[in-house]
Amino acid sequence: MSKHTTKLDDQNIITIAKQRYETQQRNKLPSIVVNLASGGEIYPKTHPLRSGKIEMRYMTAYDEDILTNASYIREGIVFEKLLESIIVTDIDIHEIASVDRDGLIIYARILSYGAEYPVVVTDPTTNKQTKQVVDLTKLQPKPFNLIADDQGEFLYTTKSGIEIKFTYLRKFTDVSSVTDLLKRIITQINNTRAQSDIEHFLRYEFLAIESKAFREFVLQNAPGIDYTYEFEGEDGGTFTAGFQPAADLFWF
């Protein structure tokens, strides 16, 4: 064996040893099993996340470095990298649906810095903005009543009788066009799963009125976290308003 090959083998051994050591140390940290917002219903029957649960550990100071990494912030992958670091369950982060990731980020915030999160909302009785504090532990998943098949896909039938199967596993919040969204989430048209057939259907057969109804159905029934919350008004009463966690979720 050449000296060059020997050096490569030695480096691989060192790398593997470091990875094992890091895994062992991280496994010593306290962790918790949390429920997915989707209840696991959007994953194939054989997928480990079909159980609706995932294990994640508490953050350390080292993990905080991820939140301030300029490169991650610039690329918009800070939360993705954070989850990649703190999820204990043996799963590829990209296999976790975006509709579930938001809930996991909320759990990470609770485990790391507590449940109190300051927000600014508009009091409808005075029409003035008011500073409030949200208890993140009170947030609940949206009701999700769709029934998936063994592949984690859902069936929708148009008024004209066309059967469409779709998935919530693919991200659909950053699409650039209607057809981009549809191509991303539709997995089957009637009995065909060929991408060319799906594209032909979208271009020449899927009427706009039916496309709109389908998109509304998908979005209205999507699982996720319900960000409506009951706040205390200036008059002593309460009001319900929605809020959206911002980039400062981990800073206060």
Image (cartoon, rainbow, N blue to C red):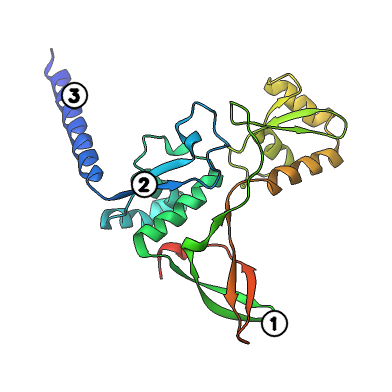
Q: Which residue is mark 2?
A: 56
Which residue is at a point 80% across and 43% down the rendered structure image?
Answer: 213
Query: Which is more foreground, mark 2 or mark 3?
Result: 2
Question: How many numbered dots are placed on residues in this image?
Answer: 3
Q: Residue at x 70, y 42 (%)?
A: 218
As drawn, is 67 to the left or to the right of 51?
Answer: left
Residue 100 showing in the rendered view? yes
Question: Is residue 76 visible in this depiction of the protein?
Answer: no
Instruction: Determine the residue positioned at 51% across, 63% down.
Output: 138
Comes first in the chain, label 1 or label 3: 3
- Residue 37 appears at what percent x and percent y? 53, 47
Q: Amino acid at mark 2?
A: Met
Q: Secondary structure at mark 2?
A: strand
Which image quarter: residue 147? top right
Q: Where does the image place residue 12, in percent across and percent down from the top left?
A: 20, 27
The residue singled out by tag 3 in the image is 8
Q: Which mark is residue 203?
A: none
Which of the two labelled residues, at mark 2 and mark 3, occupies the earlier sequence position? 3
The location of residue 252, given as percent across then percent down, is 41, 71
Q: In which quadrant will I find the N terminus?
A: top left
Up-down: is 247 above or below 119? above
* N-term mark: 1 or 2: 2
Label 1 to label 2, Cα distance in Å?
Answer: 41 Å
* Horizontal arrangement in the rendering, residue 239 relative to residue 117 (left or right): right
Q: Amino acid at mark 3?
A: Leu
Is residue 133 positioned above or below 60 on the image? Answer: below
Residue 82 pos. (x, y %): 38, 50
Which residue is the site of mark 1?
A: 125
Vertical relation: 119 (above or below) 107:
below
In the image shown, does 36 or 81 lie closer to the viewer? 36
Residue at 17 percent of width and 32 percent of height: 17
